[in-house]
Image: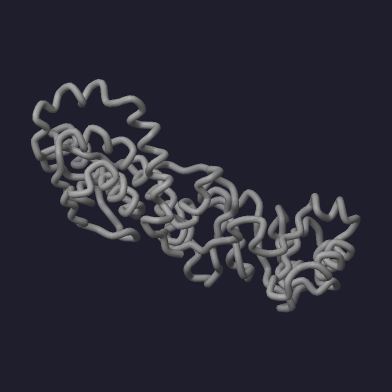
Amino acid sequence: MLLNRFMIRPLIEQGLREEISSGDTTGGFLVGDDPVQTANIYAKGKGIVCGMLFADETIRQIEPEAEIEYCVQDGDVVEPGTVLMRIKARASTFFIIERSGLDWLQQLSGIATKTRRYADLVKHTGVRITDTRKGWPGLRMVQKYAVRVGGGHNHIFNLANCVLVKDNHIKIAGSITEAVKVLRASAQHTFKFEVECESLEMVEEALAAGVEIIMFDNMDLDEMKVALKLVNGRALCEASGGINETTIVPIAEIGVDIISIGDLTHTVKALDISLDVKDIKPSAHRTIGRLKAVGG
């Protein structure tokens, strides 16, 4: 998945409208003749950087002629003190873009960093780690991009992407068999069918209906082992529901094909990133030094 300026510009503009409102009542009165200054955006924690284009576009929305030097790229591992970007722009620009630009970087880097931790835990198994649709409404595209940067994969983007039969669909239709029958008659032939199954009986019914993907929804480990034997390669097997960094390894090691994890996007700890005009401030140097001493 790739993003471009055209795709993200409306999001950047909305963030800046929120930030600027009717004007900067602090910085706007301080800049005088608005001299050109330099600044560094830098990490104060260890993680996977993501969102460089978002920070860049935030700056260029305010000052198109600003000089921006990338020191890292999305997907790079950064340590405390790593400079991500050097900028030369008017003083007023830094006051306006600091919070909005850093918020994009911090949140997206947080998702990428968490995703990398999950992916590293199960890289010995070959299982595919995917996101879900849980997260920030209206910003799903952005979150899913960060998951890809972190080394994960994407599940469906929206309701139009595939036929995903969940518990409420089954209740309305009356059974998995009836739901699949009705949907097969209507859906375009290029779609794969996935059914969410909470029991072994549901797995058997989904297999009989000929679906391509079976989701083991909130099953325990022993149930999933039996379910895998029932499937026996006739469909892709996805584990989902409450999976975290403690439980993911044994699930991956039983041989499922996919593990979908809402935790990648719905609960995110931002990576600490700062912007300082001129030199990095002394207090930040002290923080960076402490973090380096304990390994980030």
Q: Is residue 108 above or below residue 226?
A: above
The residue sitting at the bottom extreme is 233
Residue beneath the point at 31% across and 49% down: 57
In this rendering, position of residue 195 left or right of residue 76: right
- Which of these two is toward me, 240 or 137? 137
In this rendering, position of residue 134 left or right of residue 171: left
In this rendering, position of residue 213 left or right of residue 266: right
- Which of these two is toward me, 18 or 217? 18
Whether residue 222 can be seen here? no
Q: Quadrant of residue 71?
A: bottom left
Q: Is residue 290 above or below residue 218?
A: above
Residue beneath the point at 69% across and 59% down: 221
User: Total marks drawn?
Assistant: 0
Where does residue 267 sit, x and y in percent of width and height? 51, 42
Q: Quadrant of residue 70?
A: bottom left
Where does residue 84 sit, x and y in percent of width and height? 23, 51
Where does residue 10 sit, x and y in percent of width and height? 42, 46
